[in-house]
Amino acid sequence: MYCFTKKEFVKFIAEPLRVKHTDKKCRFKGYPKEKIEIFMKDEKEWNKFTRLLRGKLHCGVIPFLTDLIYKQPELIFPGFLKGQILCDSKLEITRKLTFWLRPENIGFEVDDRVEFEEKLSEREARSGLSQLVNEVDLMSDEEIDGQFCELGRTILEEEPAGDKEADILGGKEDSDESAGQVLKNIETVQEVADPTALITGQDKALKDAECAASIMNIFTMNGEHKSDSKGGRRQTWSSKFINMALELLADGQCAASVHKYFVTMSKFYPELLEGENRRVPSCRYFERLRDALPALNSAHTKDTILKGDRFVLACDAAAMHDATKSIAVGIINTVGRLHIVDIRRSRGGSAEAVAEQMISIVEDSGASRILKSKVDFFMSDQESAQIRANCIVSQKFVGVDNEVAPPTVYCAIHTSSNACSRSIDALKRVSPNAFILLDSIRSCYGKAASGGFCHQDGRKVLKTLLKERDDKTTMIFADDLGKRFGCTERNAGSLVLFFSTVLKATRCLKFQYEQKKKDEDKNSKFHLIETLVSGQCDGYVLDSAGLFLNYQAFVNDFHKRVSAVGEKALTFSMLKELFKSTLGRIQAVLNAPNPYEELINAARLMAVSEESVATLDCIDSRWVKATALARRKRLNQCALAIVEGTKWKLQKDFDLIKDLSLPDDRKIISTNRALESSFATLKGFQAKIKNLGQEKLFSVATAKYNKLTVWLSDLPSEEREELLMLAIKDKKVQAQERKRKTIEADRESLLSIPKKFR
């Protein structure tokens, strides 16, 4: 192996080339010595002389030297023997020449003004450079560097040196000084005060040159397939360009949009296409890149499984916009990071069908046995079919690597959600009018702007009054559309805190409704709200406020703690203690002589925000004023019913996990929120790219959620390039796979149609 070092470079420029002017391979005619001297007197001219130019009109010294050294090293280096191999690649040679031919290395000193202070006799030692440039116009700045696309890390070797510059130029001894320092260390040139600063500045300038070269080389086809269908090599775009295109495709852009983006870029920056072997890919090329996403997702999943320690196997299903149902299986690591293994169209809702699809996804991951040995437990909701499916799959995991079937931990978000639902149902049984009040408030004042037409809409009037009276610009009520829980409870608290403003808005809207409907029935929801809040003492406001107190005292804190991930994630012992402490505080409210008052005190202990504290003060003042025994008895009954509904759900889920055989110090990701949020990404893409097939849609959503391009960027350049080229190479195999999946999807759709309609 022969390496192109600084020492060889100094020898090379100190001696005339052994290549003749008539050599047709180099197509070269040198500059006269006098013209070289003129160039070297001015740094600007020297930069133009040594710039990276190549084309019909320009032939810079660096491209010429690169080709000469790479293709004919035996004519350049006296010590190079036939049969030896040059270990430097073409890009590495180009980069070294770019660095060594910089002005500060060749003899310029950068101060307030740039001067070249080297003696003519010393400069004549490098007269071999007179044979390195064509007699063409080098004054043009039209073309920019096109040789750098993916400049990897280059090792600039430092050679030991002697004390004399002549020894270095003659190659007799090794030197510790770089070629630039040797050429500058001549009688009239002052030494650099801080060599470290010079190196840092050189590295920074070189990095800037690399960045500029990379963006200018965006459309250069310098990537290579290992082999095509005919056994030869063929060129393609760089792995960096492919990764950029994949980023756009995984972000939900269609192939035509990505193609249009690059076409527009080349239109406004035509210099990007100047040079040899540069062009914008066709739309079909980006379609092929999108077709390669399943293979890349599979490689990403396999790498995640191999590098991971322990996992939670999560599974969930959701309905799409087109009324089909999809199932997703993911793995969650110990810090709560979800990686989606695969998303597929659901083939059925029975336990056997769900279990079959889960096993199929695990087997197709590429590292199924390793994954089975690393799964600690399953995570899912408490749907009956899913519970039975988890039991079936866990038995399949028992084998050589697993002596015991992994247990199942059910999602704690459903614990919080169902606890709120049971509390609302309890309020509906004990105090139906309080439930009707909250439902009317939600319908008139809480409907979302995107929810469509609202027959009796009071949002505009309420917003105006809130801004005038309470200096509040946001809406205080919300609709439960798209929200799991907490919406009705927050509406109950807002009704108490802004009671006077809501009552005034209701009366104003009631009057407007009466004026508009003079000859018709005047019973509207505004009439109903006014009636329900204007009864004895405060009507049913305190009854409904029990939901807010229960949520603030128990559910809100429980949900925040089980949703923690990363370093704040709960261990298994901490999760059990959380259930125990919450159930203990609930039991204290149930055993109190005045449950409603005890519920206020429990909520006050958990209040954090100023708005929550103000709401509790309003509820407490109303409770103090409600002195009638019958009134207090009804409020205590409401509090007992609401709290008992929450206790039932918490106790049920605690009984499911308290006897599990998991290590107490094992961190538990207690919610399946991450996997459920992936369906939101999938539905967003489904609405955005409506003409994309379902299988492709699943691949795009998986690449987006798993951050495929970030993983590709972190890979070593050689491994990344090999993976990308392999993924986009097998067009025939990909086409057959797409055809097979399409036939299977059509067959499943046909089977779902009743026979009498076929």
Image (tube, rainbow, N blue to C red):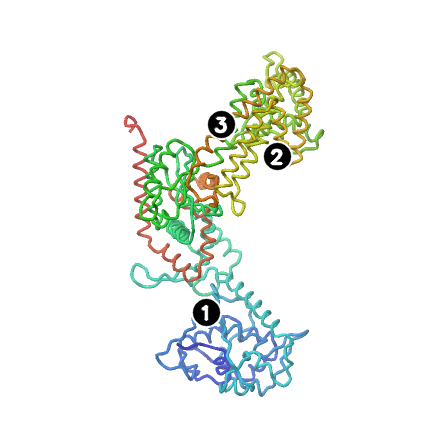
Identity of the residue furthest to the top in this view: 519
Q: Are marks 3 and 1 in contact (CB under 8 Å)?
A: no
Q: Residues within 10 Å of mark 3 (few under 14, many from 20)?
A: some
Residue in the foreground of this view, choosing between 312 and 722 = 312
| The label number, if any, that marks residue 648 in the structure image | 3
Q: Amino acid at mark 2?
A: Met
Frontmost of labels 3 and 1 is 3
Please identify the quadrant where the N terminus is shown: bottom left
Mark 3 and mark 2 lie on one chain; the one further toward the N terminus is 2
Q: Amino acid at mark 3?
A: Trp
Residue in the foreground of this view, choosing between 630 and 388 = 630
| Residue 143 in the image, given as x and y percentages of width and height | 52, 66
Q: Are marks 3 and 2 in contact (CB under 8 Å)?
A: no
Question: Where does label 1 land, which residue?
Answer: 91
Question: Where does label 2 land, which residue?
Answer: 606
Rendered position, 706 above or below 525: below
